[in-house]
Image (cartoon, grey):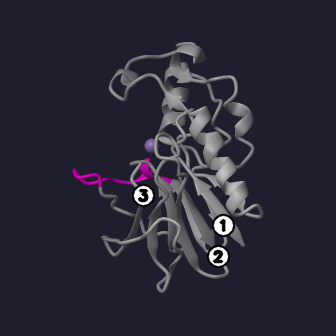
Amino acid sequence: MKYALLGDLHSSVKDTKAVLAHISQCVPDAKIIGLGDLYECNIGKRKAETIRDIPMKKAARMPKEFAPLLTFPSVRGNQEERIMLVTGRDDFKQLPEKIIIDGAVIMHGHQWRWTKDWLPVLPKTDPPLLFFGHSHEAGLYRKKKRLPFVYGEPVFLKKKRYGINAGAVWGSREWVLYDSDAKTVTFMKVD
Ligand SMILES: [Mn+2]
């Protein structure tokens, strides 16, 4: 099965349209799944500690054209959680914290610790292959090390346990193709 994984859209209509078009051009039969932070919260982390019950319009960037683009399942990111916190609403409660696909787990990276240099301290998941977003930095991780990759070139997964950050749609137009039968991941980026 082929999966197209995309995260950190942050309400960008242009970037999301570009990535979805790229996906349907490159792998029209792929199942698309979101890695969280679909929306952009307008309230910063510190302010969000005290701000409550503000209107959705103030709390989140929600351009009219954006929601209709979200036709795929997704996990919940920290942006969605913060939007719910400051509005007191539960618009994103139905988004799961975790989705299990063929041989892999999908989560947003706010669920674990990150080092000062923004390296993920990855949890040991089951299945052991973990796809995520959060830092907006595409990366392939194995045993705390970052392994090299080239955009557009499939990486064969020789071992079982890897962490794969798909990068960001917003600003970078990145996504990842996972082929669970071929056991490959391909980091992709719209030119
Ligand atoms: Mn995030």
Label 2: few (<14), some (14–19) or many (≥20) C-alpha neighbours in 10 Å: some
Q: Which mark is residue 180?
A: 2
**Kind of residue sitting beneath label 2:** Ser
- Is residue 114 found inside the magenta-colored segment of the image? yes
The reply to whether callout 2 and callout 1 are in contact (CB within 8 Å) is yes
Label 2 CB less than 8 angstroms from ligand 1: no
Q: CA–CA distance between discs 2 and 3?
A: 19 Å
Q: Which secondary structure, mark 1?
A: strand
Residue 32 image offset from top left, x and y in percent: 69, 56
- State the image quarter where residue 105 is shown: bottom right
Between disc 2 and disc 3, the foreground one is 3
Residue 163 image offset from top left, x and y in percent: 44, 67
Residue found at the very far left of the displayed protein: 116
The reply to whether callout 3 and callout 1 are in contact (CB within 8 Å) is no
Q: Which mark is residue 138?
A: 3
Q: CA–CA distance between discs 2 and 1?
A: 9 Å
Indicate whether 159 appears above or below 51: below
Q: Residue 101 carries which label?
A: 1
Residue range in magenta is 108-118
**Kind of residue sitting beneath label 3:** Ala
Quadrant of the drawing holding the N terminus: bottom right
- Give 56 or 90, whichever is nearer the viewer: 56
Q: Residue 181 carries which label?
A: none
Query: For ligand 1, which image quadrant applies?
Result: top left
